[in-house]
Image (tube, grey):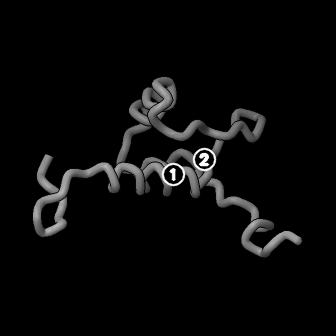
């Protein structure tokens, strides 16, 4: 039996939303996709693409998890 969480349609983000959510520029996003360092877009057809919000959120979380922290558990300056 499939749970409600499994049946929900994934939220898709358009490029402007990905830029806002990540703070990355369009060129940086596509450069990182080419380098396999960022989730790839989903082709929706007709020159329309989007990104999975779940994948973008996991990418952001992975970046946060990879930060160096000080003895108080706060992120160190880069």
- The residue to which callout 1 is attached is 56
* Badge 2 or badge 1: first in the primary sequence: 2
In the orientation shown, which residue stands out farthest toward the front? 71
Q: Please tell me which residue is depicted at 49% across the width and 57% down the height of the picture.
A: 57
Q: Nearer the viewer, residue 16 or 18?
A: 18
Residue 50: x and y in percent read: 63, 45
Classify residue 21 by image quadrant. Answer: bottom left
Q: Residue at x 51, y 51 (%)?
A: 56
Q: Secondary structure at mark 1?
A: helix
Quarter occupied by the N terminus: bottom right
**Cα distance in 3D space between marks 2 and 1:** 7 Å
Task: Write down the residue under mark 2.
Answer: 51
Q: Position of residue 74 (x, y in %)?
A: 17, 65
Asked if marks 2 and 1 touch (Cβ < 8 Å), the reply is: yes
- Of 38 and 29, nearer the camera is 38
Q: Is residue 4 left or right of residue 41?
A: right
Which residue is found at the position 57% from the left and 56% from the top? 53
Q: Is residue 40 left or right of residue 44?
A: left
Residue 16 against residue 39 in the figure, above or below? below
């Amino acid at each position: 039996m499939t749970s409600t969480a499994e049946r929900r349609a994934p939220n898709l983000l358009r490029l402007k939303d990905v830029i806002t959510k990540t703070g990355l520029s369009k060129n940086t996003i596509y450069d990182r996709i080419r380098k396999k360092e960022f989730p790839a877009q989903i082709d929706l057809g007709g020159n329309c693409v989007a990104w999975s919000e779940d994948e973008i959120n996991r990418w952001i979380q992975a970046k946060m998890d990879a930060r160096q922290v000080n003895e108080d558990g706060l992120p160190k300056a880069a």
